[in-house]
Amino acid sequence: MAEEFGHGPESPARQKLIEISLGLWEHLKKVADRDADESISLEEYKAAFAAGLLETPESFDQGYVPYIDAVVAIADQDGDGKLTASEEIRWMSSLMNVPEDVSRAAFHRIDKDKDGLITASELVESIRGYYFDESPDSPAHWLLGSLDT
C-alpha cells in the first residue's frame, strides 16, 4: 500500500505503518497460537480477534485508531488529514483488494457530512460500526460491499 502512494522504504509514514502492523501481528501471535504450533489457524484467529479487538468498543479503538491513523498518513496525498474518494479507493484496493465500485459506494456512506472527504475518525467510526452496529441502515454494513451478495 505504501508503494501505491509513493512511500519508499525510508518514508516515516511507511515505517510507522510497518511498526504498527508488526506490533499487531506480534500481539496476535501471542494470544492466538493456542496450541503452540507456530501457526495460527482460522479458528484461533477468529477467537483471538473477537477476544481482543472486538471485546468492547474501547478495546477496538486501542487497536484500530493507531492503525487507521497510519493508513491515512500513507494515503492522504495532500496531508490535510482527510481522504478523497480517489485516495480511499486506492488504499482499499491496494491493501484489501476491494473493487472500485464497492469502495466508491462505501466512501459515500462513510462521508456523513457529504463534504467529499473522509477523516480518520469517520473511517474508524465506520469500521467500529462494522463490528458493533447491528442496525440495517448503518454505513458500516457497506464497508466491504453489500452483505446480501
Image: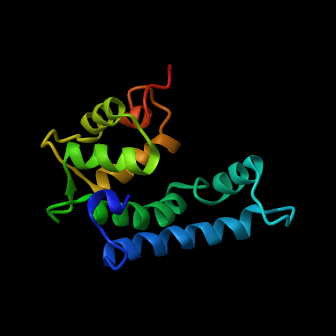
Q: Residue at x 20, y 56 (%)?
A: 82
Residue 25 lies, in percent from the top left, at: 60, 67
Q: Position of residue 17 (x, y in %)?
A: 41, 69
Colour mode of the rendering: rainbow
Q: Is residue 142 above or below residue 113?
A: above
State the image coordinates of residue 49 (x, y, percent, origin top left).
64, 54
Residue drawn at x 63%, y 60% is: 52
Q: Residue at the top extreme? A: 148
Report the side of 100 relative to 38 (left or right).
left
Residue 65 found in image quarter = bottom left
Who's the residue at 43% across and 64% down the image?
67
Q: Residue at x 41, y 68 (%)?
A: 66
Question: Can you tell which quarter of the image residue 4 is in?
Answer: bottom left
Q: Nearer the viewer, residue 43 or 62?
A: 43
Q: Is residue 55 above or below residue 69?
A: above
Establish if 5 lies above or below 126: below
